[in-house]
Image: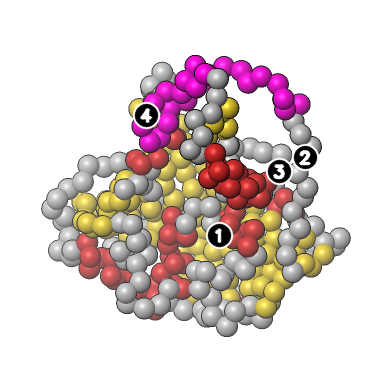
Amino acid sequence: MLVVVGCSGGSVETGSTPAEDSTDSLTAQQVLSKTLQTYREARTYSGKATYFQKKKKKSEGVPRETVMHEMSLAVVKPDKIRFRMQQKYPKSRQNVSYDIASDGEITRSVAGILEDQIHETQSPEQLTPANFIPEPNIRKAALEVSLENIYPQLAMMLTEGNGEQVFPQDNRPRLLSNEKLGERLCHRVVMDSLAGKRTLWIDAETYLLLRMELPIDGQMATLDPEKRFSEYSVWIDYNDVWIDSEIEDDVFSMEIPEGARRVSKLVLPPTGGPPPELGKPVGDYSFTTLDTGEEITPESHPGKVVVFDFWSVTCPPCREHSPVLEKVYQKLKDNDDFVFYA
């Protein structure tokens, strides 16, 4: 599925009802193709992005909008890039941010929680979606969500070949009625996947992507397990977007702060000691499984050893213990005395 580029920043209501007939004579596939061609032919790109989440509790009836991430991107093909990502919510004592800079010769990367370390390596001759973040820990953390769900513009610019798909899981593209985003008239292309509907807002004149509503229907059991919300949506607005404009060289250089050291691989901080709860009885709990919808409580498995694994792909200790836990699971999964949940 090809990706589209959209309208300039603005504010409109999301979640409009799909219209089978568009006011535009183009087909959805033609709009996607024009967008993909626009990005592939672009020599440079620069812009900012804001990742929003909007929820409305049934008990309140008032939608609340939250900024989750702020990002910026500058690219000069074939080998210069500056990509920044800053988590804005939930608020944390840790500086959850990432900064990657390649000037065509040296690529430097830094994670906010390890700001005293600067990863440094030789820049690739040609940037690709797989190599533009060379440090593996930063790549896993920054791309916890796949690139097409963060910056599809970058995926379009760096992916070559007519057979490549920007949204490989999406299908059945179709046009909704054109809408204005700020002052720009946009084509709106909606696509289906197992995760839900993705809607792209594409500038009808420039074919630049300026808004992407993300598919989350398949995640609602996790996002809202207790069904507290009557509305839940996430989208990304792309603002200050420019293609084929001149970008100063200093945008792609990263200075090494005083006291920081250059490293070939980030050294992750040591994990803390065992928690005080270790060895103590577990309190009451209740949750619903994703596969069967069964409610699980302490009474569900009387007399058995129940293993709960709470994990995240951005958690270094989780990545370390997961292969070990997998071996334990494979050894005990057929033993009726043990039950595993992750």
Q: Label 3 vs label 1: CA separation?
A: 20 Å
In percent of width and height, residue 201 lies at 33, 55
Q: Main secondary structure of the magenta part?
A: loop
Q: Residue at x 56, y 46 (%)?
A: 326
Q: Which residue is mark 3?
A: 94
* Mark 2: secondary structure: loop
Q: Residue at x 40, y 57 (%)?
A: 210
Q: Residues within 10 Å of mark 1 (few under 14, many from 20)?
A: some
| Quarter of image, res 115 | bottom right
Q: Label 3 vs label 4: CA separation?
A: 35 Å
Segment colored magenta = 276-302
Residue 150 drawn above or below residue 156: above
Q: Residue at x 74, y 69 (%)?
A: 264
* Mark 1: secondary structure: strand
Look at the image and tell me whether residue 209 can be seen. Answer: yes
Of residues 185 and 102, the one nearer the viewer is: 102
The residue mark sitting in front, 3 or 1, is 3
Q: Which comes before the other along the chain, label 1 or label 2?
A: 1
Q: Label 4 vs label 2: CA separation?
A: 35 Å
* Mark 3: secondary structure: loop
In percent of width and height, residue 164 lies at 35, 71
The residue mark sitting in front, 4 or 1, is 4
Q: Which residue is mark 2?
A: 272
| Quarter of image, res 165 | bottom left
Q: Residue at x 54, y 64 (%)?
A: 73
Labelled disc at residue 72: 1
